[in-house]
Amino acid sequence: MRPIKPINQEPTNWRDVLEQIYKILRQNISFGDGVNSDNIDGVFVNTVSVGVNQDYTVNHTLGRVPVRFIVMGGNDDSITYAGTIPATDTQITLKSTRNGANVSVFIF
């Protein structure tokens, strides 16, 4: 997590000012930068589906059973959804409406 400059510290440029305002408005809640998580307890994983509407396993490093996942992006119009195999502290299963869909998910 990147430290936030104290409000009483003079910003060095307008970008710093706008970033401070943005962080205050969203109450410092952040998923992270798309690779590393910030202050929401979760991990980003990039994956590729292996069939149409077929379970495929995705490894994660949470160290606990995840609550949910959010699809954060992909390269097509496929739909990614939860698989039928229960999640574990190291894996989840997903399904996709397209074979070979590249998807980025945030697992939390």
Image: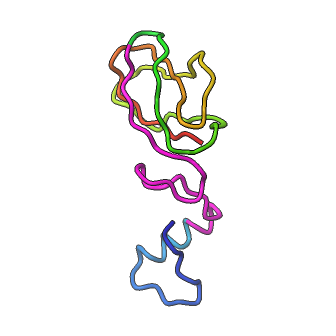
Q: Is residue 2 above or below residue 97?
A: below
Which quadrant is the C terminus positioned in? top right
Magenta segment, principal secondary structure?
loop
Quarter-wise, where is residue 12 in the image? bottom left
Residue 86 image point, x, y percent: 63, 23
What's the image's color scheme?
A: rainbow
Residue 36 in magenta stretch: yes
Q: Which residues are magenta?
A: 23-50
Q: Residue at x 59, y 18 (%)?
A: 85
From what the image shows, is residue 40 above or below residue 76? below
Question: Which residue is more in the foreground, 100 or 17?
Answer: 100
Give the vertical position of 17 relative to 92 (above or below): below
Residue 99: x %, y % from top left = 36, 14
Examine the structure image and report whether residue 46 is included in the region drawn in magenta.
Answer: yes
Provide residue 34's location: percent of width, then percent of height. 42, 49
Q: In x, y percent, where is residue 71?
A: 50, 33
**Residue shown at 46%/44% (left/top)?**
44
